Amino acid sequence: MTSVRIAGVGMTPFDSHPERTGRELFGSASNEAIDDSNVPRGDIDALFYGNFMGAFAEGQNHQGPLMADAAGLSVPATRFESACTSSGVAVREAVSKIRGGEADVLLVGGMERMTNEPTSFVTEALATAGDELYEGRAGMTFPGAYALMANAYFAEHGATRADLAEIAVKNHAHALENELAQYQREISVDDVLEAPLVADPIGVYDASPITDGASAAVLVSDEYARERDLDAPVSITGTGQGTDQLALQDRASLTRTPAAERAAEEAYADASIGPDDVDLAEVHDCFTIAEVLALESLGFYDRGTGYQAARDGETTRDGDLPVNLSGGLKAKGHPVGATGTAQIVELTKLLRGDHVNSDAVSDAETAITHNAGGTVASVTVHVLEVVA
Amino acid sequence: MTSVRIAGVGMTPFDSHPERTGRELFGSASNEAIDDSNVPRGDIDALFYGNFMGAFAEGQNHQGPLMADAAGLSVPATRFESACTSSGVAVREAVSKIRGGEADVLLVGGMERMTNEPTSFVTEALATAGDELYEGRAGMTFPGAYALMANAYFAEHGATRADLAEIAVKNHAHALENELAQYQREISVDDVLEAPLVADPIGVYDASPITDGASAAVLVSDEYARERDLDAPVSITGTGQGTDQLALQDRASLTRTPAAERAAEEAYADASIGPDDVDLAEVHDCFTIAEVLALESLGFYDRGTGYQAARDGETTRDGDLPVNLSGGLKAKGHPVGATGTAQIVELTKLLRGDHVNSDAVSDAETAITHNAGGTVASVTVHVLEVVA
């Protein structure tokens, strides 16, 4: 089985881009990734592409052919949709296809436009990632669902809003100099606590923003990288995927995310590593409580203790396990379909040493992504390693 | 490289099902496929699932976890969307994953609910499979787009509405006894010609209907089938995928479908066969003109001659190359996301000898699918063979 190397990465600034279409955003990210890879366009076998709400945001389903064209390719193009892990799933299947010898070079990526519609419309569009029949019709939105999870977590483990606020503060601090991040602005715990509540205990600063953006990566087989003498030091050495009941009401616990646990277990076994081997992580902090659950499901913290991580400085830039050095979904932004590949982009840059925050982790060799859809009903986890 | 066997198939009646949710439809089809396969549920590695317009029809994106649950599975579930070839793409990637040794047993399938919304709404939803910016905003709908293609074909090759009518008549005749088909009713050429026009020259009977339905198949590696001593005589021996410009205006010709030509070329080469080896076909006759273009792109007819096939009785039940013995999209129905897998279901039954129309092709050993999205911007082609 071949290993899979990341030959090139690219992403647009994550921001509000009212003047740019989805195809233009993805064209920009993918062209950057292809240029970065030094792979000739003609060698690319297919495009695996993630998008969540194009049907709503641009009246545009069937984006595969459009995005292949935007990337200057006329190759088979396939769209994956798995809510906020749409491009995470695209990465997973691309890795699988290259490993199985079914392709040598794949362009993977994702795009989302969200700011061109009113926030209330976007909130409703996002709610289609939950169970329409048993959640949507009852008025459940994602801030509401994560509020339930946060309140349950508070009741079980004694965490407070101030603990969660530390996560937002950390991720804003990480994004401070990341020019691709939506918010490059420091915030304080007081800012978080004093901000308006969206759904108690989730306040405005506990939630990731609405964002436009695209991200892309060129994945190649190890053999291809060697033959072409590519400079591609980072490999994807582990992949995992987990699925859970879509509706919260069908789950045994509101404070555990078994889909993430299964995805992590599979990815660790696949890469033959464990949580102790990981030097840095990009996790799916769509809400601050989500980062806590991610840290626990990835095995970094025992159940009920993950909320202490940011507060105690362990997951900050100078901590033992920096988490979301990109700024995370919270401060980097969260254009849903682009988030999975964006985590790959950020970690590749961090491990290669060309990310703005690379100096914080100059010895890092092993990193992990955690990308979740819905209320963690779909999860992909990927292990990235520097391989000689 | 292992070959891929079809261990079991299932589908709901294609019809209007106002009382059934999408999850119930898919649960029904997938349970039938799993029962038919004799594969224990615990052996299924993942679900690859196709759906096109759930965001519109049921306010439900992120259907993967929902459909895994409906099938009684808690395995990774991935949704593919590629317009009307959404489940065709799911089949292709499932075949690839099993061949590459990345999975042994996969459930593939698709579902669409369409009749629960007004026709005008469905027409708009379907239009999101075209280019929103350059076609949708100009008022282009799919009957309109295929009308342009039909008129161009008439002008170039001298075909008439009466020639196309023969295709509708044939496909209705094929569906006559197929109890899973939406229309089990004979029609005449005059019926077609006298029916109201939707978009000149496309009349009501030139167009496939709006349909609810689901379909599924269990795909296994050859090794798995042997170990378990499964009765699975039909294999998928070739797969091809092609992509074209999404907008008609960007193409060199309105009467050729290069994405289908590329997909066919790849699938034939993959299976080491040619058009002359094919005994029967299920092709994407979303409109009658689409069946003509399909026959030409698959290499069965020279360019500009495919319109004669049904008229001359060559693609009818008793012809040399029966096409759409299921009734095709025209008479069997076209629940978009379910159509790709439904073609696999129908051909498997025809080749196994347990389809209502199997007696027409009792010696058939090789069959082909042609499943197209948009105005043939995305195409998957699969070769099925009876393998000892």
Image: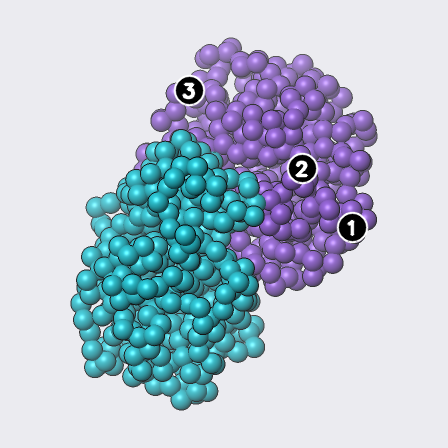
Chain colours: A cyan, B purple
Chain at tag 3: B
The residue labelled by disc 3 is B253
Left or right position of A352 against B237: left
Label 2: chain letter: B
Q: Secondary structure at mark 1?
A: helix
Toward which corner of the image does residue B160 lie, by quadrant? top right
Q: Closest to the observer: A257 or B9?
A: A257
* Disc on res. B236: 2
**Of callouts 3 and 1, which one flags the residue occurring earlier in the amino acid sequence?**
1
Question: Neighbour class for label 2 at 10 Å: few (<14), some, many (≥20)?
Answer: many
The correct choice, above or below, for B239 with respect to B254 in the image is below
x 27%, y 73%: residue: A318
Residue at screen point 51% across, 44% down: A98
User: Which image quadrant for residue B93?
Assistant: top right
Closer to the camera in the image, A55 or B73: B73
Q: Position of residue B104 (x, y in %)?
A: 66, 51
For the residues beneath circles 3 and 1, the answer to whether they share a chain is: yes
Tell me the chain of label 1: B
> What number is the disc on residue B227?
1
Q: Amino acid at mark 1?
A: Glu
Asked if residue B290 can be seen in this view, the reply is no
Residue B315, compared with residue A322, is above or below; it is above
Residue A43: x and y in percent read 42, 33
* SS assignment at label 3: loop
| Residue at 45% from the left image edge and 51% from the top image edge | A91
Q: Amino acid at mark 2?
A: Ile
Q: Three-letter amino acid code at disc 3?
A: Ser
